[in-house]
Image (cartoon, helix red, strand yellow):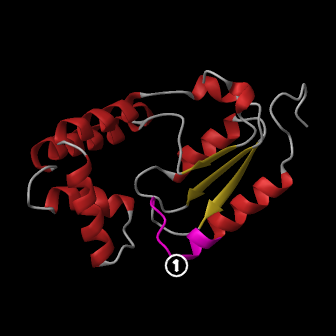
Amino acid sequence: MRHPERVSHLVVYGGFAQGGNKRSAQEKEKRTAMATLMRMGWGANDAGFRQLFTSQMMPGATKEQADSFNELQRRTTSPECAVRYFDTVGDFDITDLLARVSVPTLVMHVRGDLQQPFEAGRRMAAGITRARFVALQGQNHILLQGEPAAARFQEELELFLATETWRPGESNPP
């Protein structure tokens, strides 16, 4: 980060410090297979390839929500770009940087998240000194309007921003 003094709070949802390729051989193998499918079918008119990704991001979606997300994926990026992003995220590891985060931090993660394991979010929060971890009930990595996890997310966010008062430039955050 170029200007950490400008950051007063950090909110992370569904995050992780270590990409899937670094977590386990099994997860790396799964991600390799997923990247192959993305390369072959992301831009195709057949939404089946994208649906695999959609079902991991939001398994609780209605057919209309899933169809909309499938189309959004197709329209917003090429197969090559999607795979490049997927591979980059899978390979990074910022575990050693977590201890350097010095602002109040709220980390929220859905218990049944199929895209990013719940424990990855919990481990990330544990590595940040001033982090508060909130477990949300559900399975959707992308929160859907009307689901209980979305309402809880909003409540926790408002509470966090209302109670944490440290501002950038203060010499010693509380």
Residue 80 coordinates in the image, percent (x, y): 19, 36
Query: Which residue carries the number 1 mark?
Result: 146
Q: Is residue 51 left or right of residue 147?
A: left
Is residue 100 among what the camera can see?
A: no
The front one of 76 and 118 is 76
Q: Is residue 63 magenta?
A: no
In this image, 56 relative to 16: left or right?
Answer: left
Q: Height in image: 60 above or below 105?
A: below
Q: Position of residue 10 (x, y in %)?
A: 68, 42
**Residue at the image position 57 percent from the left and 47 percent from the top:** 121
Res. 98 visible in picture = yes
Residue under the image location 53 percent in, 41 percent down: 16
Q: Amino acid at mark 1?
A: Gly
Report crowding for label 1: few under 14, some 14 to 19, many 20 or more residues within 10 A (C-alpha): few
Residue occupying the point 58% across, 28% down:
95
Dot 1 lies on which element?
A: loop
Q: Residue at x 64, y 60 (%)?
A: 135
Magenta residues span 141-151
Pinpoint residue 128: horizontal percent, then vertical percent: 71, 35
Question: As rendered, which of 115 and 6 lies closer to the eye?
Answer: 6
Q: Main secondary structure of the magenta part?
A: loop
